[in-house]
Image (tube, rainbow, N blue to C red):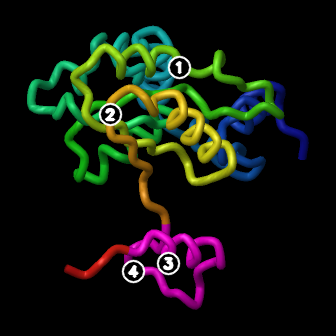
Amino acid sequence: MRSSAPIQRLVASLRRLPGIGEKSATRLTFFLLGAPEAQVSELALAIERLKREIVLCEVCFDLTDASPCPLCRDPERDASLLCVVEEPADLAAVERSGRYTGRYHVLGGALSPLDGVGPGEIRLAELERRVRAGGIGEVILATNPNAEGDATAHFIADLLRDAGVRLSRIATGMPLGGDLEYADHVTIGLSVQNRRGLD
């Protein structure tokens, strides 16, 4: 059965979202068709306001509705710790852990020469200025543990080596509650490599 043009348009639009395939897009479309008008209007308004009201924080470059963002304005955050992440979603993941109380710097991507992403395409100059301005004691490189993230972390380490700050990299390895027999060899290798002493 061929769907009408408005249905096909929404399915096609939803398919462009990450993680949404043909079936999920179709299911969401028919859900919205059957949903109360108020619910659909609320969703449409929320999407419209998202694009209109969200800006980049002038300090850390996270997404926010007021700049500087609440994290940069919070006097309880440790200003001597700076966690460098690739994207706002990574910042949100670190925050969800509840274990980090410092400040952030969002690069807006990772170095990827094959994709045309060099040092000038991400916020490395802003990071260097921020660190060299003083007040930061440690820079935690929390880029993703893949080829691009590792290359970015190494580039930043070289960039800031003489800046008088401690440079650290997030550990990688086995997830809590994971079974060794089901883990891939890279994860197990990193877990052994990043082992810590039992004091």
At numbered mark 4, what does the secondary structure look like: helix, strand or loop? loop
If you read the primary sequence from the N terminus, does the residue marked by circle 4 or circle 2 appear first?
Answer: 2
What amino acid type is highlighted by mark number 4? Gly
Q: Which residue is mark 1?
A: 123
How many angstroms separate mark 2 from mark 3 (CA)? 27 Å
Q: Which residue is mark 2?
A: 165
How many angstroms separate mark 2 from mark 1 (CA)? 19 Å
Task: Give the foreground label among 4 and 3.
Answer: 3
Q: Which range of residues does the magenta coloring cover? A: 173-195
Q: Residue at x 36, y 37 (%)?
A: 139
What amino acid type is highlighted by mark number 3? Val
At numbered mark 2, what does the secondary structure look like: helix, strand or loop? loop
What amino acid type is highlighted by mark number 1? Arg
Q: Residue at x 30, y 10 (%)?
A: 67
65 vs 104: above or below = above
Tag of residue 192: 3
Task: Give the foreground label among 1 and 4.
Answer: 1
How many angstroms separate mark 4 from mark 3 (CA)? 16 Å
How many angstroms separate mark 1 from mark 4 (CA)? 36 Å
Image x and y of residue 14, in percent: 68, 35
Q: Which residue is mark 4?
A: 177
If you read the primary sequence from the N terminus, does the residue marked by circle 2 or circle 3 appear first?
Answer: 2
How many angstroms separate mark 4 from mark 2 (CA)? 34 Å
Q: Are marks 2 and 3 in contact (CB under 8 Å)?
A: no
Residue at the left extreme, as displayed = 76
Dot 1 alpha-carbon crowd within 10 angstroms: few under 14, some 14 to 19, many 20 or more: some
Image x and y of residue 129, in percent: 41, 14
Q: Are marks 4 and 2 in contact (CB under 8 Å)?
A: no
Q: Residue at x 53, y 21 (%)?
A: 124
